[in-house]
Amino acid sequence: MTESNRKPIGVPPRRQSDNLAVQNLVKANRSPGTNGDAAATSPASHAGPLPDTAPKQVTFYMAADDVKRAKAAYTGTSGREMDRSWSDFISRAVLMEVERRERLYNEGNHFQGGARNLAPGRKIQL
């Protein structure tokens, strides 16, 4: 490819105020702290804990071969299984195992607890 001899002429012009819908969408999607208005409307500014149905990030380790296998299954079937996302796929898989264990060990009832943090990376000693 050939190099261009063009010189930059400065910053691009500001958006026209006639397209407020786009500007409001961009403003709503900015991360908190980049704009004074965004901090007032962010979920973190509301007092109290998040509701139990709010998504929470979960991190875990899995064998590399198993991750490849899971990703292949997800990409090969997500359209037919109507998975909304990789997170949805993983969440449903975990909940299927939870329900199986509840049926097998707890007469189908939810186990008590689950609010405290688990020890990271440590195997449970029997």
Image (cartoon, helix red, strand yellow):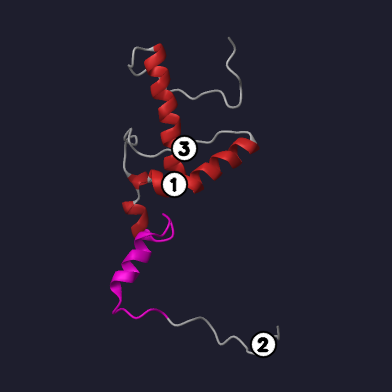
- Which of the two discs, 1 and 3, labels the residue nearer the N terminus? 1
Q: Which residues are magenta?
A: 14-36
- Which of the two discs, 1 and 2, labels the residue nearer the N terminus? 2
Q: Secondary structure at mark 1?
A: helix
66 above or below 97? Answer: below
Q: Residue at x 52, y 23 (%)?
A: 118
Q: How many other residues sit within 10 Å of disc 3, few (<14), some (14-19) or many (≥20)?
A: some
- Where's residue 74, x and y in %? 49, 44
Identify which residue, 37 or 120, lies in the foreground. 120
Numbered mark located on residue 78 in the image:
1
- Where's residue 106, x and y in %? 37, 12
Q: Residue at x 29, y 73 (%)?
A: 20
For the image, the number of numbered tags is 3
Q: Residue at x 33, y 32 (%)?
A: 52
Numbered mark located on residue 4 in the image:
2
- Where's residue 80, x and y in %? 40, 46
Mark 1–mark 3 distance (CA, rounded to whole Å) = 12 Å
Numbered mark located on residue 90 in the image:
3
Mark 3–mark 2 distance (CA, rounded to whole Å) = 48 Å
